[in-house]
Amino acid sequence: MQASALVRAATALIAAVPLFVSAQSRGPAQAARSGTLVLAGQQEEAPLLRINGRSYVDIESLARLTGASVRYSGTRVILMLPSSGQQASGAQGASKTPQFSGAFLIAEIEALTAIREWRVSLVNAVENSYPIADNWIAPLRRSADSKVQLAAAAATTEPEQKTLDLLRNEFANMQQQSDNLLALRSRLSYIPADTFNDNPQDQKILACERALAHVAASKEFQDDPACH
C-alpha cells in the first residue's frame, strides 16, 4: 500500500475507535471477534471486534500494523504515524529503475582498467628510463580502444550514453598524452623521470579515472569537469 493510502486507512480506523484503547477496556458482553485487519503489502494482521454492529481494532494493534507509536497523556491517546513523505521516498527509491545495466558497468570498468594499464606502463617506462616505442604502446592503445567500443555497444540508456562520452574523453586524453611522450622521445635521447610530477594533463587523466570509478561504484551518472 502506498504511504498516503496507508495514512488514510490508519486515520479512518482511528476515527472509528476514539474510545477503544486496548483489549482491557472491552466489555465481554458487547464485544465479539469478527475477523482480522490486514493492510495491503503487510504480513502482520490484527483482530477485529464487532461492537454494536461496527468493527473496531485496538490502538496497539493499529500502531503495530502502521509502524506508528502510541503515547498516553492523561485521558488522551496520541498515535504518531510514520511520515508519509519518508515512506513515499522509500517506496520510490525501491522501485527506481537502475541507471546502468550490469553489462555496461562491466564494460566501463574493463575500459577504465585498460586505460589505467596503458598509463601505468608509460609512467614505469619514464621513471625507469626505458625507451618508449610505438611497437609496445600500440597493443595497449588497441586494448583500451576495444574495451571502450564494448562499452559503447552496451550503452543504451541516457545515463550510460553520458558516461560513455566521459569514458571516450578519458581515452582521448590518454591518447594525447601517449602521443606527446612518443613525440618527445623522438626528439630527446631520454625523457626526464619527473615528467609526470605536477603534470596537468596527467592529473586530469587521474581525476577523470576517479570520477568514472565513482560512477561505477554508485551506479549513478555524475558529470565531472576533469573528463572534459
Image (cartoon, grey):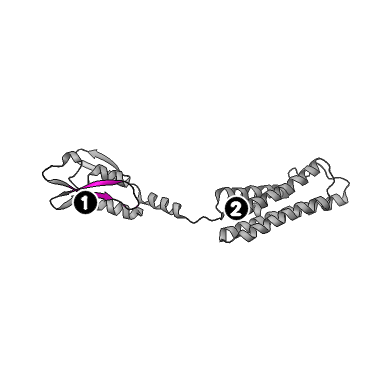
Comparing 51 with 161, the one in front is 51
Q: Which residue does the image show at 61% across and 52% down from the upper left?
A: 106
Quarter holding the C terminus is bottom right
Q: CA distance from mark 1 to mark 2?
A: 51 Å
Majority secondary structure in the magenta region: strand
Q: Quick one: SS at disc 1? A: helix
Q: Is residue 171 left or right of residue 136?
A: left
Q: Which residues are magenta?
A: 33-49
Give residue 107's position: percent from left, percent from top: 63, 54
Q: Could you say where residue 102 lies in the image, as x and y percent from the top left? A: 57, 53
Identify the residue at horizontal 16%, vertical 52% (top origin). Answer: 54
Indicate the quadrant containing the N terminus: top left, top right, bottom left or bottom right.
bottom left
Q: Is residue 228 visible?
A: no
Most foreground residue, 138 or 122: 138
Name the amino acid, label 2.
Answer: Leu
Disc 1 packing (10 Å; few <14; some 14–19; many ≥20): few
Where residue 111 sits in the image (x, y, percent)? 67, 52
Looking at the image, the residue that sits furthest to the left is 29
Mark 2 sits on what residue? 105
User: Farthest residue in the right direction?
Assistant: 189
Q: Is residue 116 something one can see in this rendering? A: yes
User: Local crowd at mark 2 within 10 Å, few (<14), some, or many (≥20)?
Assistant: many
Q: How many numbered marks, from 0 up? A: 2
Residue tagged by mark 1? Answer: 15
Residue 219 on image: x %, y %: 55, 51
**Magenta span contains residue 112:** no
Q: Which residue is painted at 28% across and 44% down in the image?
A: 63
Left/right placement of residue 175 relative to residue 208 reads right
Q: Amino acid at mark 1?
A: Ala
Mark 1, mark 2: which one is toward the viewer?
A: 2
